[in-house]
Amino acid sequence: MSAFKESLITEPERYEFSAAPIHQFELARRNFFKILGAGIAVFVAAKEALASPQETAPGSRSFHNEELPKEITSWLHVGEDGTVTGFTGKAEMGQNIRTSISQSIADELRVPLGSVRLVMADTMLTPFDAGTFGSRTTPTMTPQFRRVAEAARNLLIGVAAKEWNLAPEKLVAADARVTDPISKRSLSYAELARGKVLTRDLPADDPITSATEWKIAGKPLPKVDGRAFVTGAHKYASDLRLEGMLYGKMLRPPSFGATLTAYDDSAAKAMSGVVIVHDGDFVGVAAPSAHEAQKALDAIHTQWKETPQVSDKEIFTFLKKNAEPISNDRFRRQKGSVEEALAAATYRLDATYNVAYIAHAPLEPRAAVAQWADGKLTVWTGTQRPFANRDELASVFHIPESTVRVIVPDTGSAYGGKHTSDAAIEAARLARAAGKPVKVVWTREEEFTWAYFRPAGVIEVRSGLTAEGKLTAWDFHNYHSGMSGIETPYDVANQRTEYHQVPLVLRSGSYRGLAATANHFARETHIDALARVAKMDALEFRLKNLSDTRMRAVLEAAAKSFGWPRRKTQKGQGFGIACGAEKGSYVASCVEVAVDRASGAARVVRVVEAFECGAIVNPDGLRNQVVGAIIQGLGGALFEAIQFENGRIKNAHFSTYRVPRFRDVPEIDAILLDRKDIPPAGAGETPIVAIAPAIGSALFGATGVRLNNLPLVPNGLRA
Amino acid sequence: MEIEVNGKQYAVRYPPDTPLLYVLRDELGLTGTKYGCGEGQCGACTVLIRGAPRRSCQIPVNAATGKPITTIEGLEREGKLHPVQKAFLDAGAFQCAFCTPGMTMSSVGLLQTKANPSDAEIVQFLQGNICRCGTHPRIIEAVRLAAKTMQERGR
């Protein structure tokens, strides 16, 4: 078996093309109530679902033949003790959705936040979900849970109305109680749910509370289970310990593409308590402790045949040379005539931008604990795609999906880097051989080598301006890195944007914002250079060519707070600006840098970033995401790059792969624009896209040197 | 071999050259201390040994015998959070929080030697701790907050 089943071609956005499959739900309604006890439950189904509540007494009606409707995306239960439980297939990995979703449920159901708990990312208990990526949680889960909670609230009001023989419209729901304002009679949700088994399927178009009326959502509330994290009590997947559990380790090839030619495990086999699995290209061991597993691994003798591999020195030439020769309509957007407009332009500017491979480097490495019992497999793992992990596990072990359960404990970050099921498959394979549970935690070196990277890319831009500084021609070609954020937000009549596929060199995949980091870097750097060609201020030039009011608003907000345009007051000082929009949210960054000309050291001194993602669900959590994206983006902008040669990663350690540390962190001012008239969009990705071009623009301001490659200054800057 | 962790004596059967981190996590089940790199580069495994912050992945367990070790699990007293834990909670100084135990232990270590550190001193001291989510400004704020609380209480 192979742990890595990769298509040889990168997809522009790996996950966007896979439609949600038809799924069997393991959790029939009877099981749902068996697990959670009596009470009321609301299921969100798409269109055909029943709109009227069905009432039953416990036990009097069979749910045996009832399947949950297809396309269910969330559900909610109000228990006999008043506890509200929401179920979602989304995973928490630091983006704070456990809190923000709970806020929306509490808000719409009219209960205190403390009575809401969320069951997340468990393939047995939660609805199918394609994965936690693409900034999709807030835009999809917020309205769905609001509709669910609103339906549950109406069910509870209906029960009270029946009890009191009153019209439901006359009753008020607030603070987990239904009250009759006239007689002042009142029943708690717990009392109303007691002894009931009530369900409702929900049509998709129920009205929900407008953001201007939110009481619990919209507030900067702290992380719901923060205490478990500051005490070390929270168990990440890598912290789990099961009875009789073994520790697994994998034998990795010396280089990418190497094949096993000789294998001898006789010495390792002689060690007591050690389980060895050699199955095709899979070599792994499990032992009662990590050091015993390592000792056994070291005792396995192997020889490998290595094959020539592309190195970082030649990567950009390689990508350009090996692009698919035939242009693909699916990857091209075009309007007007670019060639005619270029020929007619007063000013022309063409440039090429290169973007390096970078690593996500989540602080919790890939980890999984696998357990087989009665032919069924349970895996606890830190992944962004529990259902896809389940399907992959079912597929590699040739067992039905219904016999695999994947559970995701709140995870030690991912940033797009934990889509695959590598550690889960490894732990499960070893556990099957051992007949005991096995835990696999990747080493940092494995994480830097055998995970996947944000792909490298080459971006070529040709452009033309009128004498007045109006953009008339825009020709933008991305080789390999991807399509996210590829379309220009600027008003330009003649434009072509195209993504060109290239066969994979290093294993590549999603990253925070996907290719939007690369495409924004190239576009905004180019726009900055065009502003100089037109002899205009960088902000003025942008505003002249932008009619999108949301983009203009973030630019103006950032510029105002930063004091743009600013004059240099010291040597080596420089200021830069950039903007972007992706996945329904808008960002603008202003940056001040300081360059020490003698040493070439470049430092980001200050960042002002304005961000707008519609109505804000939790401003505190959002601010944390925005500041985090700025700091993470600063690493990719200034110095992060994977170095590779002869199929080996040369900097697979935190000592050689530099990530932002405390000393790199500038003064940061995040301005959050709250648009209560716009439904909430996600915020995990877009705040990262403008930081690299804004830093590049500021470095140009400081030195007069235009840097067209990411990272900008891996070894400092000499000018 | 025995080690003293959070005021309790534990017998250790793992080999004497095993890094303390694995003894804590795998043998003793104290999983609050995290593995982030195993190379002393990220600070996720920081514990206090005789009150001083140390990277437990770099210390063989036999070098830790006879010295009191404090882990994140040992900070809470009778259900009350240590001021540094409380400050991290109040400042919301985490996202995925995987670095939080190490950050907390380093900060406790800092405040034991320097009651009122400047921002520059906090930055300098925490330089060896990685937060990949980019929560650094709030972590600095949390250390400031904890310093203030501890000084007000006279420790």
Image: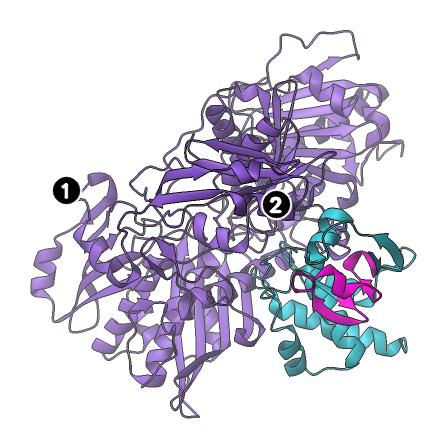
Chain colours: A purple, B cyan
Question: Are marks 2 and 1 in one subunit?
Answer: yes
Q: Looking at the picture, how far across and down is residue A472, in whole percent?
A: 18, 62
Q: Is residue A479 left or right of residue A302?
A: left
SS under mark 1: loop
Amino acid on which disc 2 is placed: Glu
Q: Looking at the picture, how far across and down is residue A250, in whole percent?
A: 52, 42
Q: Chain of mark 2?
A: A
Residue A215 in view of the camera: yes
Q: Is residue A612 above or below residue B141?
A: above
* Residue in front for this viewpoint, A242 or A677: A242
The residue sitting at 55% across, 46% down in the picture is: A366
Tag 1: Cα neighbours inside 10 Å, few (<14), some, or many (≥20)?
few
Q: CA distance from mark 2 to mark 1?
A: 41 Å
Count of all numbered marks drawn on residues in the image: 2
Residue B92 in view of the camera: no
Q: Which residue is mark 1?
A: A326
Q: Is residue B63 left or right of residue A636?
A: right
| Res A697 → quadrant | bottom left
Q: Is residue A146 magenta?
A: no
Q: Which residue is mark 2?
A: A92
SS under mark 2: loop
Which residues make up the magenta segment?
B48-75
